[in-house]
Amino acid sequence: SKEPGLRMETAMRRGALAVSVLVSLSGACAAFAASAADEIEITPAQIETLGIVTAKPEPVTEWQSPTYPASVVIPPDRAFAVNAPLEGLVAGLKVAFGDTVSAGQVVATISSPAFLELQRDFLQSLNDLKLADTELARDTRMAREGIIAERRLQTTQARHAEAVTRAAERRRALRLAGLGDDEIDGLAKSRNLIHEVKLRAPVSGVVTERLAEVGQQVGRSAPLYRVADLSVLWAEINVPTEVVGTVAPGARAVIETREDGGRTSQARVISIGPVVNPQDQTV
């Protein structure tokens, strides 16, 4: 520098030299802004000694926002309820909160008189169908031989179709009560009534809530458990309205979980809510 009273000596320590250079360059920038004719010449040796590195400016495609609070939520299409198909008494609960379950696994049993009644109706419908089969075969043969009128055969055919429909409805009711086709076929063969309804997990996942106790009387469709597939989670982030315009679907987000030692997860913005929270003016 040609400024009086400011010198750069080679014997100065590296830290002091760095401060002097920064001050000199700062002054030079101010002088350059005032007059483009004033310049500082730095030799290649000085550049190497000072460790000056230059780089070509690149356009910025991403910027990092401040940290915002977020809540982890389960996507609605991955949360399920295990409901009682019939009214009855909770006879057993097989899993607890936080347990991992597989699809089709038995999680609870219910003792229900209505369940016994459904089975009796099903077995009776099978008896009626068997009788209708016999009558249809007999009247078909007799009509072919001209012994009975066509109208009587049509009446028998209608009764047979009604019996088939009733048996199908009773089978469907047992499916809704939690029985599989193999169990229904076994019931039809053995004629031994099943005394308890088995409730099964609808999907593989984790039990997120238990809503019943053993010995509790529950009504039809009463929830006993909530099960969720946690392989995919959402994070609801509260972003101030003044910066929400800088966020768009597809933007990258870094989710930091403080409870487990600061572990981070990568995510992408999938939607932006259209409503502003009136309590804190966030979206």
Image (tube, helix red, strand yellow):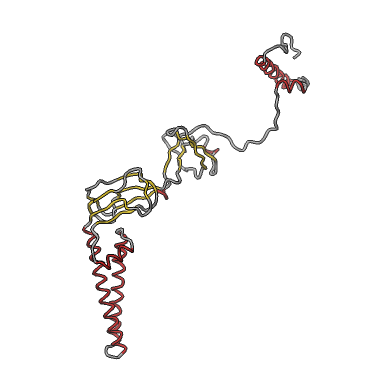
Q: Residue at x 23, y 56 (%)?
A: 112
Q: Using the image, determine if residue 232 lies above or below residue 129.
A: above
* Horizontal side, residue 3 vs residue 263: left or right: right
> Can residue 39 be seen by looking at this rendering?
no
Q: Quadrant of residue 25?
A: top right
Percent position (x, y) of residue 250? 54, 44
Percent position (x, y) of residue 126? 27, 71
Q: Quadrant of residue 248?
A: top right
Q: Using the image, determine if residue 106 lies above or below residue 280.
A: below
The quadrant of the rendering that contains the N terminus is: top right
Taking the view exactly as shown, the residue that stands out farthest to the bottom is 146
Percent position (x, y) of residue 101? 37, 49
Front residue of 23 and 51: 51
Front residue of 101 and 282: 101
Q: Residue at x 70, y 32 (%)?
A: 56
* Horizontal side, residue 43 vs residue 164: left or right: right
Front residue of 86 and 270: 86
